[in-house]
Amino acid sequence: MRVCILGDGLSALTLAKALINQNIFVDIFIKKKAQNINRTRTLGISKYSSDFINKNIINIEKILWKINRIEILTDNLKDEKILNFKKKDQLFSIIKNYELYRILEKNLSKNKYFKKSIINQEELYLVENYEIIINCDYHHKITKKYFSKKIIKKYNSVAYTTIINHENILNDTAVQIFTKLGPLAFLPINNNQTSVVYSIHNSINKNNDNIKEQIHYYNYKYKINEIEKIEHVELKSLDLRSYHYKNILAFGDLLHRLHPLAGQGFNMTVRDIMELTKIIKRRLELGLSFDQSVCSEFENNIRHKNLIFSNGINLVHEFFNVERKMKNSVLSKSVKFIGNNSSINKMFTTIADKGIFF
């Protein structure tokens, strides 16, 4: 069996490796040579996702930084943790985007089941003979033609990302602070580096110097030596209305995008890969055909789960958006009270790890 994938981002390469591990030939088509990977961007990977990747896709253990605790604070309750999640071995992990990309690309380049080619938009006829075409390219002509109907929520916010270099510290705790400007996350990468993601509303005029000042102001645990280059990206959530057109399946960021406050975007893609590879494996074992019914089955099995999960993340964002605008701590204290319930705390931890339906 041979599958075509359009695009070579992280979702595309991760899926390609998962399919190749089932002895499926994968041809990737891209529009240009260089894939520009932002070196300040990191991924939050749940233990459930990292276990699946290590076992079924590729060993990433050496580039994972394991987090055992998450502390959540808010401006309305100064110096008080409103939520505290912890696990002895591993709650989740942080990984640099470009390191995961580099490992996947290096492994795939040596694999006989893998081929990457550069084509232009006028050469789409080259992909017509594939049984399944998986589109991971948001800007592709096929996307504009068949996958233009989306549910889009604009957060009217920009995410600023950077890495801070600091003195050595036992760095196994992630911190999320819901400030008056927006959510600010400190995500450990190793014992002397931490990723920072600060999502700020568009109405607030900010430049890189202001962002650095805010990082210093809210930092309470690191002796910072350097703040690296600050990148930014506009934030919005996206849910595709239809996952496939005939035998063309949309995938990755083309299917769904989330606010980064919960670090769940790539985990949703990993769960999509779990579902798609399970469908394909079963069909291979039963000798069933590979056609658009694979795409239909995938959409029927996963779309409602993704939609519920996306709406859940949006609800969390809206809640804390209201909380940051309040001049008192009523909502913050309510969250703290609920979070202190061990059963509720465990439920939130499980959902963050495995998704809605586990």
Image (cartoon, rainbow, N blue to C red):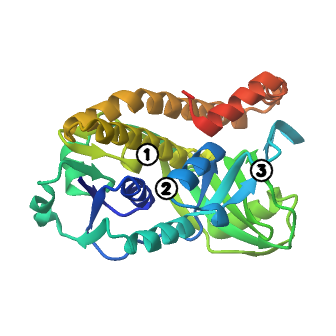
Q: Residue at x 28, y 63 (%)?
A: 28
The amino acid on which the numbered mark 2 sits, given as a three-letter code, is Ile
Q: Is residue 76 above or below residue 188?
A: above
Circle nearer the N terminus (3, 2) = 2
Q: Residue at x 20, y 56 (%)?
A: 141
Circle 1 residue: 273
Circle nearer the N terminus (1, 2) = 2
Q: In this view, does 27 lie above or below 324?
A: below
Question: x, y (%) of residue 329?
Answer: 82, 30
Quarter assignment of residue 140: bottom left
10 Å neighbourhood of mark 1: few (<14), some, or many (≥20)?
A: many
The amino acid on which the numbered mark 3 sits, given as a three-letter code, is Val
Between the C-alphas of marks 1 and 2, the distance is 10 Å
Circle 3 residue: 175
Between the C-alphas of marks 3 and 2, the distance is 29 Å
Circle 2 residue: 57
Residues at circles 1 and 2 in contact by the CB criterion of under 8 Å = yes
Question: For the residues carrying marks 1 and 2, which lies nearer the camera in this image?
Answer: 2
Question: For the residues carrying marks 3 and 1, which lies nearer the camera in this image?
Answer: 1
Q: Residue at x 61, y 69 (%)?
A: 230
Q: Which of 297 and 111 is in front in this view?
A: 111
Q: Is residue 10 left or right of residue 318?
A: left
Question: For the residues carrying marks 3 and 2, which lies nearer the camera in this image?
Answer: 2
Question: x, y (%) of residue 233?
Answer: 50, 58
The amino acid on which the numbered mark 1 sits, given as a three-letter code, is Ile
Q: Is residue 268 left or right of residue 108?
A: right
Q: Which of 99 and 297 is in front in this view?
A: 297
Q: Is residue 265 above or below residue 94?
A: above
Question: x, y (%) of residue 295?
Answer: 27, 37
Q: In this view, does 141 lie to the left or right of 116?
A: left
Q: Which of 217 and 122 is in front in this view?
A: 122
10 Å neighbourhood of mark 3: few (<14), some, or many (≥20)?
A: some
